Image (cartoon, grey):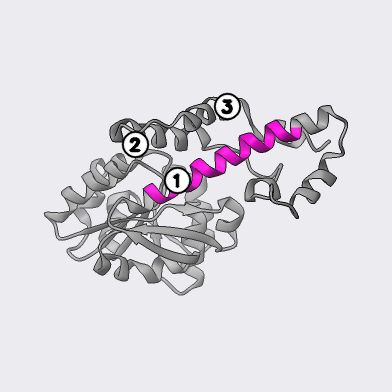
Amino acid sequence: MGLQIARHMVKKGFDVSGYDIDPAAAKTAESHGVRICGSAAEVGKNAEVVMVMVANDKQIHDVVERSGLLDNLARGSVLCIASSCSPETCQKLAELAASKSISVVDVPLVLGQEAMNNGEVVAYVGGDDAAVARARPAIAAFSAQVLHVGGLGAGQITKTINNMLLWACMVANFEALSFAKKLGVDIPRLVEALGHGSGANWSLSRWGKSTGKWAEKDMDVALELAQHAKMPMPLAGLVDQLVKHINQEKMKALLS
């Protein structure tokens, strides 16, 4: 997704610098007009708005703190955490950044890789009004909608809730379609028919395309938040267990 963020920003006329630990990924980005830096810290020297897109919270801390990125950002710049992560991670980084007059906003993205490729993701943005306003033109370069949903961390919470519903739908779809196949129903025809009924949902409309790759990570974040909030979520706990047994191959197999 980081490649697509950079590619769309270049196409919209932004001067984009980037870094990736994978030389092949960096070379691909360079072919799309991204100026490749030798480190994340060097990116900070050239940027007014920085998008961080990595896999998990540890990598976010590695990129922002340990690489020297934060130390090299200019006063008044905006650090955008586009990775899905714990709201606490964004808040901790904001505390470090505030002493340097650098703003942090969280910008998790939804609707998946295909939407990202096409510049049609929805960005759930959390942060103060001034920081979001400064970052909005860059975020809009790769997003169909930029929705400011509240203060710092609200974007991550919004995506967590969105994805809780997504994975709940996916496991419900998997169980229902498996049952239907056992009963001898033509699954592609069933999926098409359900799309016109009250059982329609986004996961079902894309059945076989979604990978479910980040389901466990998303549910871990949700359940950790629930633990801190002392909120019982038995359905979410069940979904967390069930998504471990569903993958793209199993979903596609139902269609054959």
In terms of depth relative to the viewer, which is nearer, 139 or 179?
179
Q: Amino acid at mark 1?
A: Ile
Asked if one can make out residue 15 in the rendered structure from this viewpoint, the answer is no
Residue 228 seen from this side: yes
* Mark carried by residue 161: 1
Tell me whether circle 2 and circle 1 mark residues in contact (CB < 8 Å).
no
| Magenta highlight on residue 174 | yes
Residue with the mark numbered 3: 242
The residue segment tinted magenta is 157-177
Question: Secondary structure under badge 2?
Answer: helix
Q: Could you say where residue 155 lies in the image, as x and y percent from the top left? A: 37, 53
* In the image, residue 245 above or below residue 168: above
* Residue at mark 2: 225
**Which label is found at residue 205?**
none
**Horizontal relation, residue 141 to residue 79: left or right:** right
Q: Amino acid at mark 2?
A: Leu
Q: If you read the primary sequence from the N terminus, does the residue marked by circle 1 or circle 3 appear first?
A: 1
- As drawn, the residue found furthest toward the bottom would be 13
Crowding around mark 2 (Cα neighbors within 10 Å: few <14, some 14 to 19, many 20+) is: some
Residue 9: horizontal and vertical position, in percent? Answer: 46, 67
Figure quadrant of residue 47:
bottom left
Q: Residue at x 53, y 43 (%)?
A: 165
| SS state under label 1 | helix
Q: Earlier in the sequence, mark 2 or mark 1?
A: 1
Please say if 187 is above or below 242: below
Report how far apart the C-alphas of labels 1 and 3 lie in the structure. 17 Å
* Magenta region includes residue 20: no
